[in-house]
Amino acid sequence: MQKDKWLFEISPKNNLFDLNLKEVWQYRDLLILFVKRDVVTLYKQTILGPLWYLIQPLFTSVIFTLVFNNIAGISTGTIPPFLFNLAGVTIWNYFKECLTATSDTFKKNEAIFGKVYFPRVIMPMSIVVSNLLKFGIQIFIFICFYLYYYLTGHNVSPNLYLIYFPLLIIAMGMLGLGLGMIISSMVTKYRDLTFLVSFGVQLLMYLSAVMYPLDLMREKLINLEEGYNYAWVVDINPIAHLVEFGRFMLLNDGSFSVFGIIYTTIFTIVVFLLGLLIFNKTEKTFIDTI
Amino acid sequence: MENDDVILKVENLSKQYRLGTVGTGTISHDFNRFLARIRGKEDPYLKIGESNDRASKGNSEYVWALKDINFEVKRGEVLGIIGKNGAGKSTLLKILSKVTGPTTGSIKSKGRIASLLEVGTGFHPEMTGKENIFLNGAILGMTKKEIQSKLDEIVSFSGCERYIDTPVKRYSSGMKVRLAFAVAAHLEPDILVVDEVLAVGDAEFQKKAIGKMQDISGKDGRTVLFVSHDMNSISILTKKVVLLKDGKVNYTGPTDLGIKKYLSSSKENKVYVGNPSTEIPKFIKIDVLTSLPNSVHIFGEKLEINFEINLPNKQNNLAISFQILDEFQNPIVHIWNIDSEKNISRDKGNYKFNCNINSPKLYMGNYSIRGYLSDSKLKKRYDFVDSVGNFKIEMMKLKRNDYKWESGSCKYLEDYSWIINKN
């Protein structure tokens, strides 16, 4: 009797940790081609093209400056409020784009997923990578304003931690991807979540220190005399820490806490792994439930 | 020598689907499953479920689209998979191409599986033909290097050289299909799964696809799984079939028998039954006996058409005639029997008129019978029935080199001989 050697086996035994990363690696060319597709087709048949990615953060920052700094009177220290908001919005946008674009992976790609197999995780991964392009455009406009303020004699300068900026972006991407994968997996069964995402992301922004310094929030939300402490609402939000770190690197402004770094790193890794596991479990049968 | 090398093995494969609306009660079912799992028990919903018979309304919310499927495919074999709509063919294909997982059981494979069913998947309209070749190839599992090395071949096979740097949205639909097929055809999988989706393309595309399939199994010695409703192609291309019925394997074995079984499994009553009259002659039964069950007839084989007539009184000049109509109601053949020609008079009673056509030349297609019952001298028509005893002629086994039989190319085939001289 010959011993059968099978190349692969299709079976329902989905070991939760059977991530098959080797297969993902085999399909790396597909990832690159998906990114290329997104980049090439991004501005086809639009009049303003890449300008759209400038308009959104600029207008948002203008409105934030108007509402939060001019009307509500939030102080941003020596930093020009507009630049402060633009930094926050730029960093936040990358996370937001990664999360919202990956959170409907299964639903959006139902047609292609329903016909052909490739490691599904390639799809959200490619989204996160191609979003870097949009982020690049937005960081470019940020640099332009940065130089403008610098040359007009404002007190703006980055600090040495700026060399960790790529790590911050990776953390943002991983967090967005992880959450996006969890949500997209659950959306296949419970459509309600799609409503939650668009509205939840908006709310999350207000809790993410995008338009105010983290310190100011601590100052206002903790009042020991009256015996309340709501600061934890923002403190448990890793994105608030990430936005604050980012601003710290770019503008040398705000706080820097070791606890925040450790907490955010652990949170990001846990969410990312959890997302990977749930996504992996869902990809085998989602086509039956979607 | 018999090749015993099994390349694909399907073992106890089952797939359960939930019917009705997914949504209400999903959370409670999920919760029950979760409880069962943490207590180390098996999924409580796996025990229930009914067989997948579309026509009968069941009580359970869960059905088995596939239940305990077992079969093996040997290397280099062309296996046909046949079955009615809803028998589980598509589900089986989906599991084979890893689009969805099985509920229980497994498929073991020694080779890469690719299917021609996803022709053109992932084409992006804004990208050029060349860019799409790379993207589509990568989706189907090729590496960039592999595609690069085959690029010229793919482009020339598609016949779209001139448009290769034009966005695909400017392509005609035919060009898109050609380009997509060119990519899929150069996949070189060990096991190729071909769906009946092929039938959607135009004649040229079908020919190319069938030709490629024959190449793959014949020249390259690769394994092909061929899923189709078209018994003509099944009988030509395959030697062995798996017949699925209501999610179960109904038959595995030689193609001839499988086709017979498939056709008889969906037997419909195509016999005409009429009511006798007390005054005039009437047809009481018209039945076409075809060479295969379920009113399918193999081209050229003996066809028998039986008429049962009731005569309420003595008839001197009875004339019975019938036409064989094509699917557009055009009469193709007219056959008659006139008693007065032979000076026959018939007493009252029931008669059977059996007409044998020993080697009918009717070409493949759908046919029916139009029958007349008259008095040939009085020119009085007693009975007339239209479009009864439907039957279908298939070109099974009769193979034509290089050209596939196509329906509608003629109404009948003539006997002929060629004399060819060189000048």
Image (tube, grey):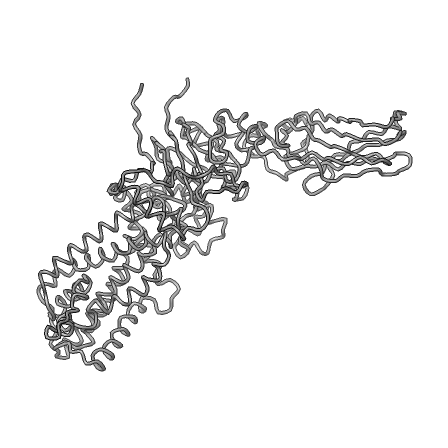
Q: Give the quarter of the figure containing the C terminus of chain B.
A: top right
- Taking the image as drawn, is residue B208 in sight? no
Q: Percent position (x, y) of residue A244?
A: 15, 66
Task: Inspect this view and state whether residue B33 appears.
Answer: yes
Q: Vertically, is B108 above or below A27?
A: above
Q: Is A159 left or right of A240, judged from the image as shown?
A: left
Please state if A208 lies on the left or on the right of A36 as rendered.
Answer: left
Q: Residue at x 55, y 31 (%)?
A: B262
Residue A231's spot in the image, x, y percent?
A: 16, 68
Give percent across and percent down for residue B194. 45, 37
Left or right: B234 in relation to A223: right
* Front residue (pair B371, B351): B351
Residue at (27, 63) in percent of width and height: A96
Looking at this rendering, what residue extends furthest in the bottom direction?
Answer: A71
Q: Quadrant of the N terminus of chain B?
A: top left
Tell me: residue A70, above or below residue A102.
below
Q: Is residue A127 above or below residue B396?
A: below
Q: Does residue A179 sit above or below A55 in this rendering?
A: above
> Is B148 in front, or is A125?
A125
- The foreground one among B37 and B299 is B37
